[in-house]
Image (cartoon, rainbow, N blue to C red):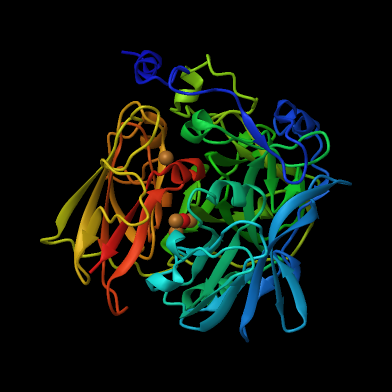
């Protein structure tokens, strides 16, 4: 049976859903027919027009590096931001003041084991809470939706950072509102430094914000007035919200001038529902680079690659060596064509407002090779020691991601209920999890709070995935090391090992969910408890 026919049987052909779109534009009138039209001036399928300087994190302001020395407040609020040149876009940003500087969506930068004291002060007109994605913190510091606070209210976080060095991030996590609050702009990086990261920095003479650059990639829809249009309806909750405009660090069609040396890029896919298959393109040729890190920090060693998938919430760190190129060369970061294995493309009856679908080919940003430099440093052969989790005698837990039932997604037989706990694990035990995705579903980026895991194997991967595998277990370079989010394709099984050792006293309530924000908001999320 073809995917299309199967999906019709499931009712994805528009029977179960009302397809009338409801648009949400902050402080503007609902005019959902306009979505996308304002975006076409910045069509990412054209390699022309990459003339906007990438917003690079600096000492303060938008995405400034904030190194916590004293307690500070994070105030999510509505404000205007210039995203499209010459236009003010109503956005949500986290505002923070720290030692005389003002930040918006600060990149928090901290040493492993250092402590911080952050108070969320909610200045939105709806509930919110901050989740520190990937951090191994106690339940009360994890930003569980049950801890969301209303307008004007506060929530204090007080913890020290137990994680390895790496590129983590933070974003809102209120029940059913993650998609909307993220779409309008909330979220940023949380960078942890440790000895291994300092060793790499020293070996390559890297400097954060100069040649070690965080890149947050997102897709959005703008109307003609430059306002974000967030459309939602039951159908879009199932398929996910896509945007026709691609942003990097809230810059549309960005460029970065580079020297002929090695750069480190810390890439985060913070889109609501878009998967990217990233590569570097110079005149139609793919240029190799090194994958050195992912969700939980550095890998054991660099892995050479020419492309990789990055799903929502995943981080991939790459090193690009611009020494092989000439001043004047243009190199593009590109998202290549792939089969999205997504009911959407099989479901043409539903007339989606977007023109840029998952799996379409487009340009993300441009590197202009600008300055010749003397640079003779070499990438170390070893980056880190990854000790494999010992799974001898570990129990295997089965997780099933079924096809949507009456148009909604489930984990096993469950959807999110704030006070239900469908899954309990014993503290200080090691488990293996076997996540099996239905053959006619969608790719789901499955994320667990509070513990990093190790991917053991991929079984029955689609060809476009298995051809990127680097070992007999079907693992990809981006599966090595430590992970908190893993993409599970339709028909695929992913097994991982996870060690539930914890020092936090008492039962710990955390979440396991799909990180497509619309799926998460729809309830493809469950509580789990460590007892
Ligand atoms: Cu970024 Cu509950 O997740
Ligand atoms: Cu998380
Ligand atoms: Cu999903």
Out of 290 and 494, give the one closest to the viewer: 494
Number of dots carrying numbers: 0
Residue at 56% over, 43% down: 272
Out of 531 and 215, give the one closest to the viewer: 531
Residue reaching furthest bottom? Answer: 70
- Asked which quadrant contains residue 149, the reply is bottom right
Name the spot of residue 28 as percent of width and height, x first.
78, 41
Against 308, residue 402 (above or below) is above
Residue at 26% over, 42% down: 412
Against 441, residue 75 (above or below) is below
Name the spot of residue 321 as percent of width and height, x first.
63, 55
Residue at 46% over, 77% down: 161
Residue reaching furthest right? Answer: 86
Out of 477 and 133, give the one closest to the viewer: 133
- Quadrant in which the C terminus is drawn: bottom left
- Quadrant in which the N terminus is drawn: top left
Name the spot of residue 90 as percent of width and height, x first.
77, 50
Against 355, residue 419 (above or below) is below
Give the side of residue 8 with respect to residue 93, left or right: left
Out of 213 and 245, give the one closest to the viewer: 245
Q: Is residue 5 visible?
A: yes
Give the side of residue 36 with respect to residue 494, left or right: right
Name the spot of residue 403 as percent of width and height, x first.
33, 30
Give the side of residue 396 with respect to residue 71, left or right: left
- Asked which quadrant contains residue 351, the reply is top right
Residue at 61% over, 54% down: 320
- Asked which quadrant contains residue 162, the reply is bottom left
Q: Is residue 302 visible?
A: no
Query: Ligand 2 appears in which quadrant?
Result: bottom left
């Amino acid at each position: 049976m073809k995917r299309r026919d199967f999906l019709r049987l499931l009712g994805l052909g528009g029977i179960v859903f009302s397809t009338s779109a409801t648009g949400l534009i902050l402080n503007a009138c609902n005019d959902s027919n306009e979505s996308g039209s304002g975006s076409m001036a910045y069509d990412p399928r054209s390699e022309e027009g990459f003339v906007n300087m990438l917003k690079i994190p600096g000492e303060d302001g938008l995405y400034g590096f904030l190194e916590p020395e004293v307690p500070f407040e994070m105030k999510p609020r509505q404000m205007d931001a210039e995203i499209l040149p010459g236009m003010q876009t109503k956005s949500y940003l986290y505002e923070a003041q720290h030692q005389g500087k003002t930040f918006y969506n600060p990149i928090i930068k901290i040493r492993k084991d250092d402590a911080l004291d952050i108070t969320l002060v909610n200045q939105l007109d709806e509930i919110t809470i901050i989740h520190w994605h990937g951090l191994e913190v106690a339940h009360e510091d994890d930003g569980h939706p049950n801890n969301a606070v209303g307008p004007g209210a506060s929530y204090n976080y007080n913890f020290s950072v137990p994680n390895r060095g790496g590129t983590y991030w933070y974003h809102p996590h209120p029940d059913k509102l993650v998609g909307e609050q993220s779409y309008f702009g909330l979220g940023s990086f949380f960078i942890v430094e440790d000895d291994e990261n300092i060793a790499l920095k020293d070996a390559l003479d890297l400097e954060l914000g100069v040649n070690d650059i965080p890149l947050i990639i997102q897709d959005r829809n703008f109307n003609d007035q430059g306002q974000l249009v967030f459309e939602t309806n039951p159908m879009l909750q199932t398929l996910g919200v896509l945007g026709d405009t691609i942003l990097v660090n809230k810059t549309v069609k960005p460029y970065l001038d580079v020297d002929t040396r090695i750069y480190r890029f810390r890439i985060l896919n913070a889109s609501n529902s878009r998967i990217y298959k990233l590569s570097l393109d110079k005149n139609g040729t793919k240029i190799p680079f090194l994958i050195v890190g992912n969700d939980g920090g550095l890998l054991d060693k660099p892995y050479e690659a020419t492309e990789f998938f990055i799903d929502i919430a995943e981080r991939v760190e790459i090193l690009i060596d611009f020494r092989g190129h000439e001043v004047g060369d243009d190199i593009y970061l590109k998202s290549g064509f792939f089969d999205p294995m997504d009911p959407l493309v099989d479901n043409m009856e539903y007339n989606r407002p977007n023109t840029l679908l998952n799996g379409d080919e487009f340009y993300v940003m441009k590197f202009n090779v600008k300055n010749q430099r003397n640079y003779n440093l070499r990438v170390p052969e070893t980056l880190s020691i990854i000790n494999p989790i010992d799974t001898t005698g570990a129990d295997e837990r089965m997780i099933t991601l079924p096809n949507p039932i009456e148009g909604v997604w489930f984990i096993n037989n469950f959807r999110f209920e704030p006070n239900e706990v469908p899954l309990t694990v014993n503290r200080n035990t090691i488990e293996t999890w076997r996540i099996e995705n239905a053959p006619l579903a969608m790719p789901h980026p499955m994320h667990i709070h509070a513990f990093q895991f190790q991917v053991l194997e991929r079984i029955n991967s689609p060809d476009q995935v298995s051809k990127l595998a680097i070992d007999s277990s079907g693992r990809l370079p981006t599966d090595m090391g430590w992970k908190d989010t893993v993409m599970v394709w339709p028909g695929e099984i992913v097994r991982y090992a996870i060690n539930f050792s914890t020092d936090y006293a008492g039962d710990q309530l955390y979440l396991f969910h799909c990180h497509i924000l619309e799926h998460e908001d729809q309830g493809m999320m469950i509580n789990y408890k460590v007892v």
